[in-house]
Image (spheres, rainbow, N blue to C red):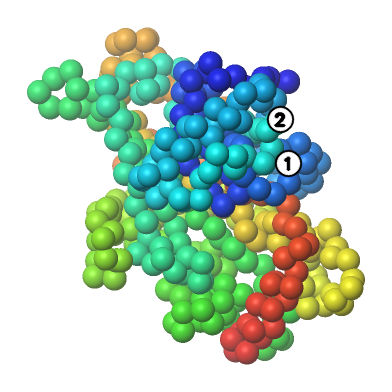
Amino acid sequence: MKTIKVSDNWKFFAQGNANILLESPHKYSGKLLRLKKKGPPSTQIFQFYEQKVVPLIGNFVAKLELVRLESQFAAYANLICEEHSRGPIAGQEVSAQIYPDFISDKEYGLLIERVGHDSTENGPSSLATTATTTTIKSADSQEGAGGGLGAVLHKTVYQMNDSRDPVTLYSNYILEFKPKWLAPSPNAPGDAVRCRNCALGLYRTGKEPAFCRADLTSSNYNLRFQAIKCIFGSFTADESRSEGVVSSITTAEAALLTELTAQFLDQCDILNQLKTVQARDTRGILDYGPDEELGDEFLMAMTFRDATILLEIAHYDSSMTETQSSANNNNDSGKDTEKTESGYLTLDRGGDKYYVRAKLVDLDMKQASRRDRWAKTERELLKYYK
């Protein structure tokens, strides 16, 4: 088992309610270190992940590795977070709830695969002189917890500035999105006309959602395409964007990303597999008595109903091929092989090659202690299904 050391020069990357993420680009390229702020310890999460999650949907989950923390590392990590607690880090506002002893698991952490990191040999990270990342929130990002889309798009452009005009070597998009309930709720009435996501959106915002997430797994191609189009359309500039949200993509970019994602999902069944796991719960929370232990199938379904999908779309500019061929004797064929072995699908659009893959994250086991909240929400939704 690896031991994570202070001398590895870690930096703050991001945080959520239960975890923080650190990065060490030189020592652990292509990985992030996840430390627990609250909830089950890393050893328990890793055991659940290896024994329960990987056998169900292992091809599509980001890789995890359990690591030991050297004795002083937790205190060191606290200092890193305190240093960045006063302003925006990695495109997000850092919570003021960082205090000197917030790491709950001081012995172990998890190294996780960093989706979107170019890991090909002699890739753009070794050639580019600048890398600019823009984080774009969907137009209804403030409604994410209330049934809105709540998606994020990260756009990174690698450039080489060795001439008067910068040369773009490589561009990368990562869509961060929760599909939520792809399978119907077992507690929905038989004559329901809305899926669980649409019912929740109407309940919490008083508005019908812009699209139905269940359409992402529809057998009807047009419904799938329109759902994807709505997702990327939410990142374009229009009057509905929140005040102060200035970053956006062009309509041409949105159209390209929509077409590539639709083509990718025609060849990759990640969302259908996610739906299948969710459908293993045939009872739903309202079928359990107040003193009855919640079944494993239900808790697993709740875990996968809150999973996040990271969809990566990468593109090498034609100048990248020429630069690599000249500097490293590499060619398109070799690059294709490297990307394929990393789990990417190669898609062709008018002679340009795009590399697309998807990974699932946020798959920690849901805790039964939330059952009262789940039951309350489901009861309140019953009248919104129709």
Query: Which of the 4 image quarters holds residue 88?
Result: top left
Residue 108 location (% of width, % of height): 70, 31
Query: Badge 1: few (under 14), some or many (20 or more) residues near its Cα, within 10 Å?
Result: some
Q: Quadrant of the N terminus?
A: top right
Is 322 placed above or below 157 here? above
Real-space Cα distance between discs 2 and 1? 9 Å
Pick whichever, 88 or 308, lies toward us.
Answer: 88
Q: Is residue 364 left or right of residue 233?
A: right
Query: Badge 2: few (under 14), some or many (20 or more) residues near its Cα, within 10 Å?
Result: some
Q: Residue at x 40, y 50 (%)?
A: 93
Is 252 placed above or below 193 here? above
Q: Name the residue under label 2.
A: 107
Is 143 placed above or below 153 here? below
Residue type highlighted by circle 1: Pro
Mark yes or no: residue 356 visible.
no
Circle on res. 57: none
Pick whichever, 47 or 20, lies toward us.
Answer: 20
Q: Quadrant of the C terminus?
A: bottom right
Residue 309 location (% of width, % of height): 55, 50
Q: Which residue is drawn at 49% across and 25% down?
A: 10
Mark yes or no: residue 283 visible.
yes
Q: Mark 1 points at which residue?
A: 41
Query: Which of the 4 image quarters holds residue 353?
Result: top left
Q: Residue at x 61, y 31 (%)?
A: 74
